[in-house]
Image (cartoon, rainbow, N blue to C red):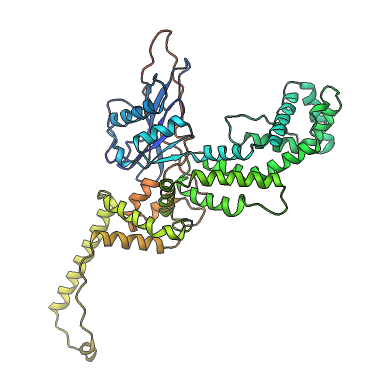
């Protein structure tokens, strides 16, 4: 069982629609209720709302703990959800003004709830990428080819004879012994996987279906295959990003600026040898993503998260925005409360010990008179010590030193880097703890099923122990 979260924490609130809220709180969490596992609803289809806390502990590991699960029978309108979130935070003494951002899907009620509360908002990147791909695939030719793929998969799913014949054809043609894949509307990337598998097994499929006059009309034509090839070529490079950025085990907010830069300059750039359909899908997908992240508040959030990531810093921030982002970082560090960390006390003790040693050595040197040398007359008089720097000057100097230090290796996780270097950046590390949080809502905690209640009884909050999230893997 994980211990209580530290002062800097992040929260995730899960509704039946599965939304997530990340909020750093200024004080330790206290409530008479025990934590509860995050879940969406019971087996009796009763709606619940769960409150989950995300935080970076003193060992620089991303943790999560579900705090409560409460019955939420009201209509899930933006106004009701907005008030429900405020009440949930209030029951745990969590301050709204210390939030980092609210992470939700693209549901209009979710967007409205966050807007009504005037909270920072970051829609789930995995969900937005999925919507961008779906938007790019809106084409009659694609619709016809996808419907055909589904019919082909169904033809084999409900016939063991066809599956047997498919296995024989795969062996004869030297194709991999793979089963066909069905598209699932709730699984990101499942359409691309279905298309890719149909293209891989196209010859075996044509042999099996073409041998039966009842299923010959399901054999893909060359026009269908051209469309499927174009779709697969446009969408397949995005699949790895969906897998990498759709889990909260990764510190993924700082990834968004580099990924969008990569999309704009490499992956979604049209090439001369591509078909017009592939170019259209890429350009439409890219326009959708850029429009969704063009909001100034969202862009500033992504920039500040990239700034405190030692692998990226200002590399992916537009040149004209760098100074403004640095000023925001300085302003936020000025407003942060002073930390009383072990690192600071250790540093103070070392400085005091060093000063005492120097003073003792100086007293001993003065006690023993020494004959002056010729060189001693040529020594320059030491200038007086400069006046102490103000708090703002110290913060600016710290930020400058951080930006001038070598970038972390791309395979090094940002939290691991901060664990090694936090003693050098005592104020900036507080900013890193605030913004190096998940950008997706999937997997915010490990859900546990809510026990079904007796018929006619009312659901009640269900207690459970805090559950820490898995350790953050190394960055890709």
Is 138 left or right of 108, judged from the image as shown?
right
In this rendered view, identify the residue nearer to me: 29 or 276: 276
Of all residues shown, which one is farthest toward the top? 456
Q: Quadrant of residue 466?
A: top left
Q: Quadrant of the N terminus?
A: top left
Q: Position of residue 283 (x, y in %)?
A: 61, 47
Q: Quadrant of residue 235?
A: top right
In this rendered view, identify the residue nearer to me: 388 or 348: 388
Residue 59 seen anywhere in this rendered image of the structure:
no
Question: From what the image shows, is residue 197 above or below residue 337?
Answer: above
In this rendered view, identify the residue nearer to me: 116 or 70: 116
Q: Position of residue 288 (x, y in %)?
A: 55, 43
Is 212 left or right of 449, judged from the image as shown?
right
Of all residues shown, which one is farthest toward the left? 367
- The structure residue drawn at horizontal position 40% and vertical position 51%, both measured from the top left corner, is 304
Question: From what the image shows, is residue 250 above or below residue 329?
Answer: above
Q: Position of residue 161 (x, y in %)?
A: 80, 22
Of all residues shown, which one is farthest toward the bottom? 374
Question: From what the image shows, is residue 272 above or below residue 246?
Answer: below
- The structure residue drawn at horizontal position 63% and vertical position 34%, both measured from the top left corner, is 190
Residue 173 seen anywhere in this rendered image of the structure:
yes
Q: Quadrant of residue 132?
A: top right
Is 356 left or right of 336, judged from the image as shown?
left
Of all residues shown, which one is farthest toward the front? 140
Q: Position of residue 423 (x, y in %)?
A: 33, 56
- Counting labels gives 0
């Amino acid at each position: 069982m994980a211990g209580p979260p530290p002062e800097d924490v992040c929260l995730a609130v899960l509704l039946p629609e599965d939304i997530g809220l990340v909020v750093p709180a200024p004080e330790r969490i206290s409530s008479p209720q025990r934590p509860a596992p995050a879940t969406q609803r019971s087996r009796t289809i009763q709606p619940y709302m769960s409150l989950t806390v995300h935080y970076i502990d003193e060992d620089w590991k991303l943790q999560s703990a579900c705090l409560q699960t409460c019955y939420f029978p009201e209509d899930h309108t933006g106004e009701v959800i907005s008030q429900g979130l405020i009440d949930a935070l209030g029951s745990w003494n969590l301050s709204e003004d210390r939030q980092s951002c609210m992470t939700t899907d693209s549901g209009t009620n979710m967007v409205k709830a966050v807007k009504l509360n005037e909270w920072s908002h970051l829609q789930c990147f995995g969900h937005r990428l999925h919507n961008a791909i779906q938007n790019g695939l809106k084409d009659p030719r694609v619709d016809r080819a996808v419907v055909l793929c589904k019919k082909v998969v169904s033809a084999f799913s409900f016939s063991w004879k066809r599956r047997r014949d498919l296995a024989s054809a795969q062996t004869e043609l030297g194709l991999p012994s793979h089963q066909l894949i069905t598209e699932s509307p709730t699984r990101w990337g499942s359409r691309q996987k279905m298309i890719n598998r149909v293209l891989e097994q196209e010859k075996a499929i044509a042999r099996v279906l073409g041998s039966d006059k009842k299923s010959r009309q399901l054999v893909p034509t060359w026009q269908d295959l051209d469309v499927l090839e174009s779709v697969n070529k446009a969408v397949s490079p995005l699949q790895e990003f969906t897998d990498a950025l759709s889990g909260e085990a990764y510190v993924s907010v700082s990834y968004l600026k580099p990924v969008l830069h990569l999309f704009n300059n490499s992956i979604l750039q049209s090439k001369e040898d591509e078909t017009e359909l592939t170019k259209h899908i890429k350009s439409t997908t890219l326009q959708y993503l850029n429009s969704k992240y063009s909001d100034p508040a969202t862009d500033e959030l992504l920039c500040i998260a990239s700034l405190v990531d030692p692998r990226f810093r200002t590399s992916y921030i537009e040149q004209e925005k760098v100074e403004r982002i640095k000023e925001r970082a300085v302003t936020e560090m000025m407003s942060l409360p002073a930390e009383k960390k072990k690192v600071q006390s250790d540093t103070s003790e070392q400085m005091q010990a060093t000063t005492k040693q120097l003073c003792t050595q100086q007293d001993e040197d003065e006690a023993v008179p020494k004959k002056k040398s010729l060189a001693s007359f040529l020594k320059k008089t030491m200038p007086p010590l400069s006046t102490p720097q103000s708090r703002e000057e110290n913060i600016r100097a710290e930020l400058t030193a951080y930006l001038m230090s070598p970038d972390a290796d791309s395979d090094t996780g940002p939290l691991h880097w901060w664990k090694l270097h936090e003693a050098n950046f005592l104020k900036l590390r507080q900013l890193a703890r605030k913004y190096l949080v998940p950008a997706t809502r999937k997997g915010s905690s490990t859900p546990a099923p809510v026990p079904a209640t007796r018929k006619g009884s009312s659901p009640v909050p269900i207690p459970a122990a805090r559950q820490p999230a898995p350790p953050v893997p190394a960055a890709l």
